[in-house]
Image (cartoon, grey):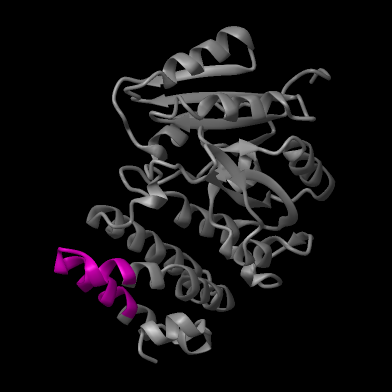
Amino acid sequence: MTASAPIVTLIVPGRDIAAFAPAALDSLRAQSEQRWRAILIDDGSTDDTGAVFDAAAADDRRFTTIRHAASRGLGAARNVGLAQVDTPYLGFLDGDDELLPNALARLTGTLEHTGSDFVAGAYVRSRPQGGGYVAGRVQPWVAASTSPERLGTTLAAHPQAVSNIVAWSKLSRTPFWNDLRFPEDVAYEDQVVAQLMYTRARAFDVIPDVVVRWRLRADGTSITQGKAQLPVLRDYLAALRGGIRVLHEAGARASVTARIELILAMDLASLLEIAGSHPDPTYAAEVETFIAELRALPEFADAMPDPATAAALAW
């Protein structure tokens, strides 16, 4: 391998993100670790996303573009990218998010030092403000999973790591993904995969450094901003159930408790609020069924809900 050969591949999918993709690509160009390549996947966009990706590839040979004539979904797009990776390390960046300038150097350097299967970093939300986007602080659940730094750790030693479930906060050794792929045709495709990563790893690292700014779009079109839609709710609850099932099957009871605590703190209050005014009674029924399933878990008694959620659930 020559000094200029890429050591890490970033898989960058996007659909109808022409307004945001330039910032994502600029965040790659600005990396202090320049030995990267990026697979840009236009997932059937109806705007100029494909043109933005093509222009980047024409200008910089580190970018490669793949275009889907029709949308196949985020999971399928990432899986297509995974089949093209030929570098020692791989990671993900959604085409409307941004890497911090030292992200790749910090992530690859950590894995080179530890030999772990993957490393997970912290991230912040980038919210619309004053006609632009402003990054916020590291949220408590992110900090609980990534701070303090833990190198060569496991779920047994750090059960709260499972609170970091997003694909784009992690960098892995490529062989770790040999038999790991994203589910397709569903939203929230990264949640089950994240739990499989934690339970399959010989060892993993967590670092408190913020590596990604995660954009919450002003127009509300992010997947995470569409939970009032019944199909999105169903995918969301399926992902939560699937993640808990993976942890149960691995015997990671402390991590199951950590996941329940986070669901109680971060998910149920908003879902109950939506259910209270949703025109379709099926929405409330599905939320109630999920709550009943949580209550039935043996780890539920160890989970500590925050006061607001406890009140909402009439505890």
In the rendered image, residue 286 lying in the magenta stretch gets the answer yes
From this view, report whether residue 88 is shown above or below residue 68: below
**At 15% from the left edge and 69% from the top edge, which residue is drawn?**
281
Magenta residues (range)? 273-291
Q: Is residue 188 visible?
A: no
Q: Position of residue 110 (x, y in %)?
A: 80, 46
Q: Position of residue 236 (x, y in %)?
A: 35, 58
Furthest residue toward front = 130
Furthest residue toward bottom = 315
Camera-side residue: 129 or 9? Answer: 129
**At 31% from the left edge and 74% from the top edge, which residue is drawn?**
290
From this view, report whether residue 179 is shown above or below residue 60: below
Furthest residue toward top = 58
Q: Quadrant of the C terminus?
A: bottom left
Q: Position of residue 294 (x, y in %)?
A: 38, 79
**Number of callouts:** 0
In the rendered image, residue 119 lying in the magenta stretch gets the answer no
**At 57% from the left edge and 54% from the top edge, which residue is drawn?**
197
Q: Quadrant of residue 168?
A: top right
Q: Main secondary structure of the magenta part?
A: helix
Q: Is residue 255 visible?
A: yes
Q: Quadrant of the N terminus?
A: top right
Camera-side residue: 86 or 286? Answer: 286
Q: Position of residue 306 (x, y in %)?
A: 51, 81
**At 68% from the left edge and 63% from the top edge, which residue is drawn?**
143
Does 295 sit left or right of 286 as displayed? right
